[in-house]
Structures are given as structure tokens and as C-alpha cells.
Amino acid sequence: MTAKSAAAAARATVYGYPRQGQNRELKKAIEGYWKGSVTSDALRATAAEIRRGNWRQLAEAGVHEVPTGDFSYYDHVLDTTVMVGAIPERHRAAVDADALDGYFAMARGTQEVAPLEMTKWFDTNYHYLVPELGPDTVFTADSAKQVAELKEALTLGPTARPVLVGPVTYLLLAKPAPGAPADFEPLTLLDRLLPVYAEVLADLRAAGAEWVQLDEPALVQDRTPADLNAAERAYRDLGALTDRPQLLVASYFDRLGDALPVLAKAPVEGLALDFTEAAAANLDALAAVGGLPGKRLIAGVVNGRNVWINDLQKSLSTLGTLLGLAGRVDVAASCSLLHVPLDTAAERDVDPQVLRWLAFARQKTAEIVTLAKGLARGTGTITAELSANRADLASRAGSPLTRDPAVRARAEALTDADTRRSQPYAERSAAQRAHLGLPLLPTTTIGSFPQTGELRTARADLRAGRIDTAGYEERIKAEIQEVISFQEKTGIDVLVHGEPERNDMVQYFAEQLTGYLATQHGWVQSYGTRYVRPPILAGDVFRPEPITVRWTSYAQSLSDRPVKGMLTGPVTMLAWSFVRDDQPLGATARQVALALRDEVHDLEAAGTSVIQVDEPALRETLPLRAADRAGYLAWATEAFRLTTSGVRPDTQIHTHMCYAEFGDIVQAIDDLDADVISLEAARSHMQVARELAAHGYPREAGPGVYDIHSPRVPSTDEAAELLRTGLEAIPAERLWVNPDCGLKTRAWPETRASLEHLVAAARTVRDELSRS
């Protein structure tokens, strides 16, 4: 096919779409099902209506090929586990008894059975359920979900393309099942897994699929020769099948590197590649391997992970270059639109000028359609769109909203001394022990306590004007009083105020800093039914006035025990926001760190002796390629130290991280120079404690003993056993006792019981240590 005919064939498509519905109908239906107020039939009906609505919107927008299989009740990797029959033995009975309840049991656990481990999906804030595989795993095909959703879409009329997690990525994301040898490599199961994929592909072809997309984002990471060989074998074998649809292998989030020639040579009909700035090297690499003659290329030129409008002229230039490198070029976003909100049209409170700079899922779909039209029919057909796009880009570039000379001058005046504590850890630790007087194995929580229905109602009433600020603040005070009273009665050593005034750990701070914009309906799925509204960082950052001091000081006035000040760290403020793309991330992080540094100073001046600066996103933002990590970690750890280094030696600085693989960043954790770190460890059975010990981590640590993302209440014995495991790696004088993460999403009954058991476990182990 010539470049001209490739252009004429250009069409628009997407890899995935937001799942929640216009008003988060899916979240409400699922949570209603868990509570028993929504039937399974009603839940399925809601889900079907959301899917149909998505397909109709895409088709009406001009998308030529809609995705199926991207919808999920909880997580698409968990859906893949079901599809290949890799149900953990402990969940088998629940799945056999009721497939839907068993599915949610794998995701959330039950009182009797622990859930699957959860961790971040590459370098995003989406969480997936980690498959558990072992030498005895037997795969069996179950294509019911994928086939049913394909048939649903085809019934509505549009061309549909099922999207599956690819077999290599699925195995690379898995971990050894309990009882499997520690050195077991799930990738060794590839030959056992491929026949199951073959059966699913045959089922989809029989159901009407012309193409099937197999997502292989794991191949954009640094891969070993064995990994690349597995990818070559997988697509050689799947490509050789006779009873299958045409195969499209997709990667995203970064450049493919050594995996690109492997996939380019594979006997598949198409590739989908990321051509945004993060993966710009894919273009040169594709040219270097001779392109994809006779094959389909889907070009991801619209960024599927940010909310800024596309530079249409720049994207058209990239697409024009690609025309000579493939038999057919189609246009898409760089990845699934799962990672962005649904529609800017729902935002009524954002400055109309700023709204012109933003593109959510629907707007990105329109950009994709415009680019496909321009590529297929010529730029003369999209003159008006190009003109409006140029004006919007110029509006943003020239806006005074994006630059504050005072903020920039302060950042430029920083020196290395501003990022270093005044005394080394050993001296600080002695001062803190004397000042705080804590027992061995001190107990604490991560920060948030349950956000009750009454509290949410009060917040809604305040927004609607049904109560005034004074009435709302009385509600906040009552919540803080209850949280402090409960912690004192339970026997927790270092208290928190519970964060009742906070809607979200990032959004709350963003709403009180200049440079940030808040949305009303910009919901994005984080995991399961947990949706967040990432703020939008559009300009330079400054803190006009203290943010947390008032409520922290009020909580401290209610107790003689130390109450932690709770802040969100600069890297997490960036990672869980949609960040400006017009300056280096390190420069933006420095501005946020300076704003937070002022807050830390004011907390200390108000008498707060323990200050926690959470950085759960430090690991998730780690670049996928090792060559890019040193630069990132340098500015990320510097930003944390800039936030925390201005305090006295006897002020104890904590940090917190959760739901990530920490082994890759242990040195960076050390470089933060925090006095205490708390980390998720319950689902991974204290793995992080062993990783810290192997590194020789010299400071205090609290590996979690209570999995807060499950409704089950751990027993005292269970928590004590995890503590004993932690003590095998971390000396008692440096070990803290805490949950994995904040308690905002939990209900009060399970929170009370779990924390009572946690404190009892700490006392049990303290007694054991005193007798040894």
C-alpha cells in the first residue's frame, strides 16, 4: 500500500474508555451490591447500559472501531485471571459457588480469605490485582465475558475490536503463588498459557471479531533476552494459528526499545505504538527496522494520560512521517482513556479560558477523529479545527496564570543546604526518643479515619448552602474528638486527627495552593470503586496561608500524646494530579516542595513534634526504563528533603508509601532521610521489611500489619505473627506498628476492631521481647 492509500485508509479508534458512567453509576451499583441493596441483575443492567452508552458516544463522535472487553467491574487484569482460569485455590470454592461474589472475593477478600495483592499498573495511579501463579497452575479458557461484550457492541452496529491483556504481560505482572518456590518465574508457564489464548481467540472470531488487540505494555520496560524470546515465541505461535481474527499487538507508556524489532517481525497483522513525547523514540526505531510494510499501524499521537489539548499540527506531522512506514495508519490515543476524566463539558466552575486548554476522554476522542480526518482527506478538511487549536495553544502559552515571578525567583535561589537536615540521623534519633518518650514497637495509623456518611452529608450541605461554615466546622470538631478519644482508649501511641476536613489527600492541598485547578466531575478510577478527582496543575505554585495547622493544633489540644501533622509530599502532589507539561517535572516539584516546606515550618512552630509527609507515589512515578531513573530519583528525593529539612533535630519526620514494588527504590527511600517510614506489607507478607534489611536501611520503619483495602478484620494473632516476621528483618527498637494505609475507605466497626487487634498484637510482642 502506498503512503497515499495508507492516508486514505486512516481511521480513528481508541483502546479503552472510562468505565464509571457519567455520574459514577457503576461505583454506586457495585457498592450497593456489596451492601445488599442492589441485586446482581440490577448491577449487570447498569453495567450493560454504561457499556452501550460508551459505544454510542464513540460511534457518534466518529470513531470507526470501538473497543470491547475494556470494561470491568473491578480490574481488567483480574478479568484476565478469570479468562485464563488462574483462580487461586483459596478462592476456588467462592468462585464455583457464585462467579460474581467469587470475583469480588478475589479483589477484596472476605473475613476468612485474603484477597489478591494489589499494586500499581506500571507508572500510573491505577491499581491492578496481581495474578498468583505456580508450577502447578492449570489454565482453562473462559471467554464468556469477552464474547458477550463483543456481541453486545456488534448488536449496536459499530465495528468492534476486543482488547485483551497480552499473554507475556500477564505472566510478567504475576507473582509466585503462596507455596510456590521463591525463585519460580511465572513466565515459564507461557507454553501452558498460549493454548488458552488460542481458544479465546477462536471464540472471539466465531462471535464476529475481525481484529483482536493484545496489550503488551510490559515490553516497554527493560526486558531480558529470555523475556524477548518469550514475546517472539508467543506471537510466532499465536500468529501461526489458522482459527483466529487478525491480531493487533499494542504497547504504550514508553518506547519499546529491543522489543520493537521482535514485534515488527512477528506474524501478526498490526502494531499499536505510543508516539507521544514519552515514546518519541518509537518513530526512529520503527524506521530503523524498515517499518511495517503491508501491516496496520495504530499511531498513539494523542496523550491518553494527561488533560492538555493536543498540538494537532505537530501530531499531523508525526502521522505524515508514519505514512511511509506502514501499509495502513490509523489514529488513536497513546493508551486507554481510562486514565483521564470523561468530559470537560460537565465542568462549570473552571475558567472558560482555561477550559479551552483541557481535553478529557470525549475531547481526546474528538481530537483523534479530527486527526484521522485530516490524514485521510487532507488538512483542508480540518482548517477550522486547526485554527481553533492554534489559538488555544497560544492562549495557554501566553497566559499570566502560568507564571509567578516571585515563585520562580525563590526556587532559583535555593542551595544544597536547603535540602539537608542540620544533624545526622543518629543524633536526631536520640533527640526524638528523649522528646517523645515512646514505648518499644510504638503504634500509630497512617492518617485518615473513616469518612462517615454524616461527614459527607455535612460537606455536601456546606457546598449547597444548607449549613454555614460555622456549622460545618462544628461537625469537623466532633469527628476529631471522636477519633482522638477512640485512639486514646485503644492505646495508640502516636495519634492522628483523622483528616475529616479532607476530601482527598491531594485535592485538599491543591485547592489551597495557587497554580492548581479543581474539577467537580473529573473522576478517574484508582482501583475498584475508588475514584479520585486529580487536580490540574496549570501554573506556578504558592501557599497563600497555612493549610493544616488549625485542625492539627485542635487535635493536639485534646490529648497529651503526640498528634502527627499530616501532609502530602511533593512527588505525590504531582503524580496524582494532571501536571503541566510546559516545564520540567523537577522544576514543578521544587515549587510544590517550597509551598509544603512553609507548612512544615508552621506546624512545628505550633508545637507539632511528629510530621508525616506522605510519598506513596514515589515508586509509581519511577520511569519504566532504568536509564531514565537516576535523573527522576535525584529531583524526587531532593523535593522531599526540601520539604522536610528545615525542622529541628527533635522533630520527627515520617513518610508513607503503599501498594507498589519497593525493591527498585530502597536506595531512594534511604535518600529521603526521613526518620520513620511506614509501608504496605500485609498482603506481601512483610516482603518490604526484608528488602529494607537487605539494603541495610538504618532508620525506623513500620511495615503494615493490617490490609486496609479489604473489609476483613485481621485477628490479634495474625497481626502479631506479621510483627514477628517483621522483627526477623528490623530490630525492635526501630520497628513501628501500623496499618498498610489510611482508613478513609473503611467503616467504623471494622476499623475499631482491626486497630484494637493491632494494639493488642503490639502489646503481645512487646511482652515476648521483655521476657526474651
Image: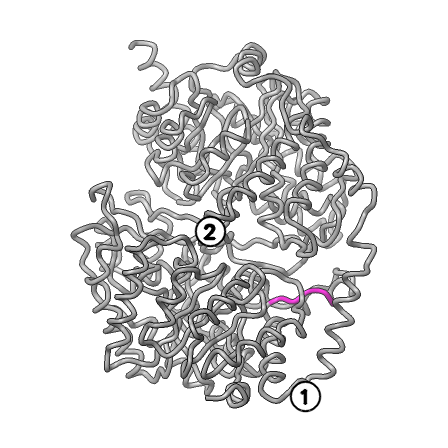
Name the residue beneath numbered marker 1: 381
Spatial CA distance of label 1 from label 2 is 40 Å
Mark 1 touching mark 2, by CB under 8 A?
no
Identify the magenta region: 356-360
Q: Position of residue 538 (x, y in %)?
A: 72, 54
Q: Secondary structure at mark 1?
A: helix
Residue nearer the viewer, 59 or 487: 59
Which of the pair 206/176 is nearer the observer?
176
User: What percent of the width, then of the height, locates residue 18?
Assistant: 52, 66
Q: Position of residue 241 (x, y in %)?
A: 24, 78
Give the residue at mark 2: 625
Judging depth in this view, the residue of 734 and 502 nearest the camera is 734
Residue type pointed to by label 1: Thr
Residue 433, given in percent of the width and then of the height, sits at 53, 13
Residue at the limit of the structure toward the left, as seen here:
136
Question: Who comes first in sequence, dot 1 or dot 2?
Answer: 1
